[in-house]
């Protein structure tokens, strides 16, 4: 084997999520083959071979092409004609033209590309983003799926007829894609991200005429229905419901000749945008389709801000940069204006009047933008936050918690949660995520541990104080919970528990039907539906008969699937997301999402908490960008997210299967990130030739903990680099910015910003570095090799154990003998405010060792949070134990919040510790 890149890099259809990417790859291959055929003209053997290959490639494309408007039947037929005639030149010309029009997107605005006979060339500018000065000159383009019983021979005519409805002042243009069955409609919705609307007619069949070999899994996953279970007359409504579950953003129109009025009154009709009686109002349908897309395209806050910026406003207010005069007329800071551009200043204001609305008391376009965000993210309410999810978390926790409440919280949560506990006076009951010691990081908290903590609280009569479960989903490193299962089992123990899911990294997940399986808001909606269903009530009755009498301390409860009482359980779910981390919002743009059946009871406290933490000068551009991020995701989120997912699969494959790169680097697999006991599906790895898409979906559907493939833990210790050094190398020498680091790994993340070129870049860089290591080792001889091995061993094997949370000092516990570990952290935090009540002990001193052996106990005065790994290894009031000291002594990171090496550890003096309460 050479160190060549893998030539079988094309992603097989049964492995990836982005069907359009597979289609584009196939078009690219066809165009290359066609060129080779044209170049080989005259050499009979080659010509025949290329012609046969071109025919096969065309046949391969056909099943995927039929779900997209472009290139359409006529162009495909023309290609077949050239093939039949053996006209290699014409075939190559047209195949290349179609590929270029697809790759550049030029087909969206240049009608000549749609006509076989017409000349049209893709311009370089078609590949470029529109310039900052000029407005995009083309109307946005999308496609509409028509599910119809019409004979396919009439598709072309229907497409033509629809085009004739276009008017010069339509804000968008669209083309029609037509299919004839339920199954084809589902594949189309998955395969064609250009779709924005679906028109469902009458009389279509259920089964597709195709086998769907390599797409059967995704079809079956997305459509857990069989034709026998559905009345033929209900196909339309069932299809609408199924599509809504896959891509909730799509507008669905029902076109029926059977009692439109009766259908309109059925509950399933709620998901439809409109019902039409037959095709009597084609123009109305056309206008409705445009209107529907217009509704998602609307960005009430941003649109208004643009209008505001054009007004000749005189400001006698704060904020001199508003209107830019202090900048552009300055003798010294004019470059600020040139760099940021005039619009930034024209769109600035410290006023909340003139239609700008107030984030603190929204009644106009901010309120509307938030309502639209709630719709987009599947929540009942959404609140914009302009100071990051650090603030969103504090708002939610302050709103929901009162002093003395117990919170079951992952100790590995972002520090904002821990600080919020101090502010609220709530008592954290720290839960431990499973450790991944070899990589100095944590996984997720096993459900068993959460249940155990709740049952222990119940056994000790403290369950009424347990208010909230607080978890990170997905974690920094990509561990996705099964939020529905977690909430279901916890509600079985305490039916009014509230959940905060910190989805700082996971906002994008809503827009892929696959990632969405693991989001909090989706889980809340599914759980609410499930608990209301008659089938669930039967399930619950059977469960109660089995488990109803069990004592809370009975270990059987830990391994049993617990079911909540449908008459008692409340769905109270909060999600926070850093919109800026995974979507096109400016830094600090964040949202709070709410699905709380009892929100009425906390509305006032929520408002107070929002007022507590929100600046009275929120950044207008951040608010506008939240509005825009929502617009983008509702219109193209599906495409962007499935592409980002596949890019991650490509990186995984290239790194782990490349003979040279994989010698020094490795992306951790699902099996390495999630222990087998939480991975019931047994999946080992993602990406071909390992896990198929069917296996990935199986894992995401049923595993207790699953791995988000877009978060790639790349081990670099095996290349002799610690995470921090490798991060620095990538940034300084290769212009690659990555996410967090651990002792021996870095976190590479794909998001909606990445391109296939980015994937190629990082793979090439890893190849270059690996080659350099090989050269250095070859040239350096035995000595260099020994030094390298020692360094790798130190990074990969001599890793410190991760310290668990020890305990709060007895003085900060209500009952030191209690089996549950909650404590008065706020009291400890404020005890440390009196400098005289604290002392410093140098970390490396003998005194530390002596006190560990003989006492008195050392009690932390501060949060101590090393970066990486980024979780608090000490919290105020915590007793410091030997494993924490050992971990700290071995830490080789520069940034440790709450610890000043020159002074040492700050401890609460023994004399000031409260006496034991009980
Ligand atoms: C899990 C988690 N929650 C919250 C935050 C804070 O988010 P923000 O940076 O938007 O304040 C972070 C930041 O990294 C995080 O990792």
Image (cartoon, rainbow, N blue to C red):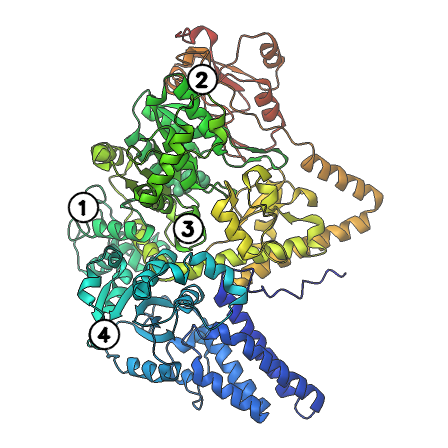
Residue at image mark 1: 317
The earlier-in-sequence mark between 2 and 3 is 3
**Picture residue at 37% right of the left edge, 67% below the top:** 195
Cβ–Cβ under 8 Å for marks 3 and 1: no
Q: Residues within 10 Å of mark 3 (few under 14, many from 20)?
A: many
Q: In this rendering, would 377 be left or right of 64?
A: left
Q: Does residue 7 sit above or below 83 in this rendering?
A: above
Task: Give the quarter of the figure containing the C terminus.
Answer: top left
Answer with the quadrant where ligand 1 appears in the image. top left
Residue at image mark 4: 278
Q: Which secondary structure, mark 2?
A: loop
Q: Which secondary structure, mark 3?
A: helix
Q: CA distance from mark 2 to mark 3?
A: 39 Å
The earlier-in-sequence mark between 4 and 1 is 4
Residue at image mark 2: 877
Residue 13: % across, % down: 55, 65
């Amino acid at each position: 084997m050479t160190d060549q890149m893998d030539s079988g890099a094309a992603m097989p259809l049964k492995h990836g999520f982005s069907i359009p990417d597979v289609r584009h790859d196939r078009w690219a291959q066809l165009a290359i083959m066609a060129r080779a055929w044209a170049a080989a003209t005259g050499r009979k053997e080659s010509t025949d071979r290329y012609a046969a290959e071109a025919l096969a490639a065309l046949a391969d494309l056909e099943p995927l092409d039929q779900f997209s408007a472009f290139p359409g039947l006529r162009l495909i037929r023309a290609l077949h004609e050239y093939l039949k005639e053996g006209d290699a030149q014409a075939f190559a010309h047209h195949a290349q033209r179609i590929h270029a029009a697809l790759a550049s997107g030029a087909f969206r605005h240049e009608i000549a590309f749609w006509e076989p006979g017409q000349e049209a060339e893709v311009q370089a500018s078609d590949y470029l983003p529109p310039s900052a000065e000029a407005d995009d000159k083309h109307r946005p383009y999308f496609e509409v799926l028509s599910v119809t019983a019409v004979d396919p021979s009439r598709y072309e005519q229907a497409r033509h007829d629809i085009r004739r409805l276009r008017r010069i002042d339509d804000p968008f243009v669209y083309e029609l894609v037509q299919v004839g069955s339920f199954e084809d409609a589902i594949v189309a919705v998955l395969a064609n991200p250009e779709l924005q609307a679906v028109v469902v007619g009458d009389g279509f069949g259920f089964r597709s005429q195709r086998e769907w070999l390599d797409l059967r899994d995704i079809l079956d996953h997305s459509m857990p229905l069989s034709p026998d279970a559905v009345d033929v007359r209900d196909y339309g409504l069932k299809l609408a419901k199924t599509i809504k579950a896959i891509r909730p953003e799509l507008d669905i129109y029902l076109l029926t000749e059977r009692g439109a009025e009766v259908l309109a009154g059925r509950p399933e009709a709620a998901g439809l945008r409109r019902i039409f009686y037959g095709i009597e109002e084609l123009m109305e349908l056309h206008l409705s389709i445009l209107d529907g897309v217009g509704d998602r395209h609307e960005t009430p806050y941003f649109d208004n801000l643009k209008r505001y910026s054009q007004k000749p406003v005189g400001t006698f207010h704060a904020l001199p940069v508003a209107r830019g005069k202090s900048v552009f007329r300055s003798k010294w800071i004019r470059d600020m204006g040139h760099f940021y551009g005039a619009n930034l200043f024209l769109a600035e204001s410290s006023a909340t009047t003139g239609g700008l609305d107030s984030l603190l008391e929204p009644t106009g376009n901010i309120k509307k933008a938030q309502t639209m965000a709630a719709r987009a993210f599947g929540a009942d309410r959404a609140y914009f936050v302009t100071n990051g999810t650090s603030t969103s978390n504090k708002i939610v926790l302050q709103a929901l918690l009162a002093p003395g409440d117990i919170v079951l919280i992952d100790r590995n949560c972002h520090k904002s949660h821990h600080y919020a506990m101090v502010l609220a006076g709530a008592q954290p009951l720290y839960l431990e995520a499973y450790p991944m010691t070899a990589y100095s990081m944590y996984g997720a908290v096993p459900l068993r541990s959460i249940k155990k903590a709740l049952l222990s609280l119940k056994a000790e009569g403290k369950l009424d104080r347990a208010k909230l479960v607080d978890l990170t989903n997905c974690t920094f490193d990509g561990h996705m919970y099964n939020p529905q299962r977690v909430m279901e089992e916890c509600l079985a123990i305490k039916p009014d528990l509230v959940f905060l899911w910190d989805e700082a990294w996971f906002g994008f997940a809503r827009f892929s039907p696959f990632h969405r399986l693991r989001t909090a808001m989706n889980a809340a909606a599914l759980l609410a539906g499930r608990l209301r269903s008659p089938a669930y009530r039967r399930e619950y009755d059977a469960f109660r008969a089995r488990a109803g009498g069990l004592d809370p301390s009975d270990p059987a409860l830990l391994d049993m699937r617990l079911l909540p009482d449908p008459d008692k359980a409340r769905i109270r779910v909060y999600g926070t997301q850093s919109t800026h981390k995974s979507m096109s919002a400016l830094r600090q743009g964040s949202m709070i999402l709410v699905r709380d059946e009892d929100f009425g009871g906390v509305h006032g406290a929520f408002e107070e908490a929002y007022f507590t933490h929100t600046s009275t000068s929120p950044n207008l551009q951040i608010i506008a960008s939240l509005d825009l991020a929502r617009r983008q995701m509702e219109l193209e989120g599906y495409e962007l997210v499935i592409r980002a997912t596949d890019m991650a699969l490509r990186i995984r494959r290239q790194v782990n299967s490349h003979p040279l790169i994989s010698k020094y680097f490795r992306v951790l697999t699902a099996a390495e990130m999630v222990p087998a006991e939480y991975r019931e599906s047994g999946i080992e790895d993602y990406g071909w030739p390992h896990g198929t898409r069917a296996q990935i979906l199986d894992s995401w559907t049923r595993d207790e903990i699953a791995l988000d493939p877009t978060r790639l833990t790349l081990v670099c210790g095996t290349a002799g680099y610690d995470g921090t050094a490798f991060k620095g190398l990538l940034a300084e020498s290769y212009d690659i910015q990555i996410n967090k680091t651990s002792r021996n790994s870095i976190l590479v993340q794909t998001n909606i910003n990445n391109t296939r070129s980015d994937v190629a870049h990082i793979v090439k860089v890893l190849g270059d570095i690996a080659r350099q290591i090989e050269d250095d080792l070859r040239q350096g001889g035995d000595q260099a090799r020994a030094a390298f091995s020692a360094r790798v061993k130190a990074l990969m094997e001599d890793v410190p154990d991760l310290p668990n949370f020890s305990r709060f000092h007895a003085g900060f516990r209500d009952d030191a003998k209690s089996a549950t570990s909650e404590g008065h952290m706020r009291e400890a935090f404020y005890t440390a405010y009196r400098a005289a009540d604290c002392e410093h002990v140098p970390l490396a001193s003998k005194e530390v060792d002596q006190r560990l052996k003989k006492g008195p106990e050392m009690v932390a005065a501060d949060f101590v949070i090393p970066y990486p790994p980024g979780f608090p290894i000490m919290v105020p009031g915590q007793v410091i134990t030997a494993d924490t000291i050992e971990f700290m002594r071995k830490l080789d990171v520069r940034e440790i919040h709450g610890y000043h090496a020159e002074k040492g550890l700050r401890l609460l003096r023994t004399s000031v510790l409260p006496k034991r309460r009980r």
